[in-house]
Image (cartoon, rainbow, N blue to C red):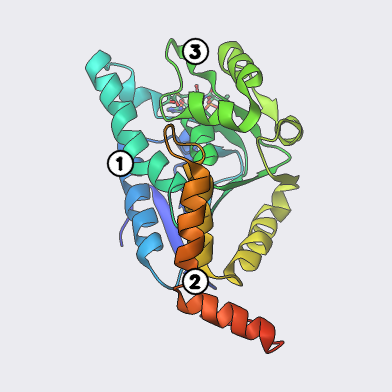
Amino acid sequence: MEFNNILVKTSNSISYITINRPKQLNALNSETITELNTAITYSEKNNEVRCIILTGGGEKAFVAGADIKEFAGFNTIQGENLARKGQEILFDLLENCSKPTIAAINGFALGGGLELAMSCHIRVASTNAKMGLPEVSLGVIPGYGGTQRLANLVGKGKAIELISTAGMISAEEALQWGLVNTTCEQLELMSICEKIAIKICRNSPKAISSAIKSVNAGFIDGVDGYEVEKTEFGKCFGTDEFIEGTTAFLEKRKANFN
Ligand code: CAA
């Protein structure tokens, strides 16, 4: 696969996707969003991949937001379409990915950049990272799911404060807020993400997929997450991985889910 804006490699069951526009602080233009859709869809279908790590190229930014130059002249219809299409082909895709996705936040994660990180299942931030949803300073609001996902992660009060002040918080504050899972020095960021990914790769991919679906179900209006959990729990009993996992336990050996 040839890409202009992202780098993709797979190693030891981990797909590494790097948004690679460092001169623009990895701002998400529409081509980058389409390329991310292709790479994530491919990684999800590829049986060799068990986990996806998403990061930004260079040392300064994860992603500094949607590409402001690209949408500056948009009208209301184009604005709504930008949000609709982006949410559908990237942000919702990531959140509902059947394989765990880890955002390695290596610098600025602003606007669409923080929205991208929040669509991932797990977030690790380096201590130089700065996070915020500064869209109201541009006369617009977060349009890639930020109003919803930030409130889900940190609560309504902190979400409205961060959004309406257009402020930025440090990695340390983000950890206190529950916005990121952990923090580390920038040099350690990839190895910390890989440690998490390696643990994930040892477990049943089918069970992990069911768990993600069940957790996500609890955040969908009108869907009973407990019901989804019961169904997904039942489905696990019909998988080869359930037989392998339980048999391995009873035989006092490590399960092999390859
Ligand atoms: N879109 C387009 N270009 C961007 C960008 C963005 N979101 N963020 C940074 N860049 C570009 C800058 O224009 C600059 O390009 P030039 O060298 O060609 O002038 C280059 O990246 C470097 O940026 P700065 O010179 O501004 O770097 P800095 O260190 O002085 O500041 C920053 C860093 C604080 C992150 C600053 O770049 C900034 O505030 N960026 C915009 C952040 C933002 O408002 N994000 C929200 C975007 S809107 C959105 O995301 C909508 C949505 O939800 C759908």
Q: Secondary structure at mark 2?
A: loop
From the viewer's perspective, is 138 left or right of 153? Answer: left
Q: Measured along the vertical axis of the image, is residue 226 above or below residue 143? A: below
From the viewer's perspective, is 172 left or right of 134? Answer: right
Closer to the camera: disc 1 or disc 3?
Answer: 3
User: Quadrant where the N terminus lies?
Assistant: bottom left
The amino acid sitting under disc 2 is: Phe
Residue 167, position as x, y percentages in the image: 63, 18
- Going from N to C along the chain, the mark reached first, 2 or 1, is 1
Q: Disc 2 beta carbon < 8 A from ligand 1?
A: no
The amino acid sitting under disc 3 is: Val
For the point 74% across and 30% down, the residue is 173
Residue 53, position as x, y percentages in the image: 54, 55
Q: Which residue is labeled 2 in the image?
A: 237
Q: Measured along the vertical axis of the image, is residue 237 above or below residue 164? A: below
Q: Disc 3 beta carbon < 8 A from ligand 1?
A: no
Q: Which residue is labeled 1 in the image?
A: 31
For the point 30% across and 45% down, the residue is 34
- Of the pair 163 and 226, the residue shown nearer to us: 226
* Residue 136 disc label: 3
Closer to the camera: disc 2 or disc 1?
Answer: 2
Separation of residues labelled 1 and 3 (CA atoms): 24 Å
Q: Secondary structure at mark 1?
A: helix
Separation of residues labelled 3 and 2 (CA atoms): 48 Å
- Of the pair 27 and 184, the residue shown nearer to us: 184
- Of the pair 181 and 68, the residue shown nearer to us: 181
For the point 49% across and 13% down, the residue is 136
Residue 246, visible in the rendered structure? yes
Residue 163, position as x, y percentages in the image: 56, 17
